[in-house]
Image (cartoon, rainbow, N blue to C red):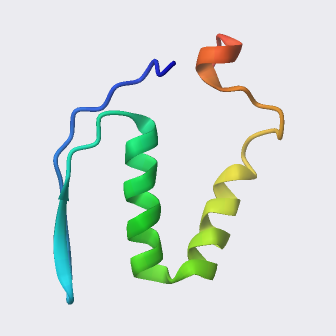
Amino acid sequence: MTTVSIDADIKAKWPQGHSSYSPGSPEELAIIGIDLLVKELGTEAAQSFIAQIFEKYPPDYMGVTQSGRG
């Protein structure tokens, strides 16, 4: 169950096009962010960038909802 809600309007532009997004949850925001990272950096560089973020958390981190802490 999501404990964080998002109210945002995102407009992204690049030479080949543009998109508008309205994420309502962290999951939807992550999908948008990953999609834009891949468009910007390519698949391997985007995966490397995301891996750096995961290094901040222990492998068994259960998130705020499950663990009760941030």
**What residue do we see at 18% from left, 66% from top?**
19
Left or right: residue 6 compared with residue 3: left
Report which quarter residue 66 is drawn in. Answer: top right
**What residue do we see at 43% from left, 37% from top?**
26
Q: Quadrant of the C terminus?
A: top right
Where residue 23 appears, as percent x and y from the top left, is 28, 42
Furthest-top residue in view? Answer: 68
Left or right: residue 39 compared with residue 42: left
Furthest-front residue in view? Answer: 1
Report which quarter residue 4 is drawn in. Answer: top left
**What residue do we see at 81% from left, 38% from top?**
58
Furthest-bottom residue in view? Answer: 15
Where residue 12 appears, as percent x and y from the top left, is 21, 67
Q: Is residue 64 above or below residue 57?
A: above
Q: Is residue 57 above or below residue 14?
A: above
**What residue do we see at 21% from left, 40% from top?**
8
Q: Is residue 29 above or below residue 43?
A: above
Number of marks present in the image shown: 0
Where residue 9 appears, as percent x and y from the top left, is 16, 46
Where residue 67 appears, as percent x and y from the top left, is 70, 15
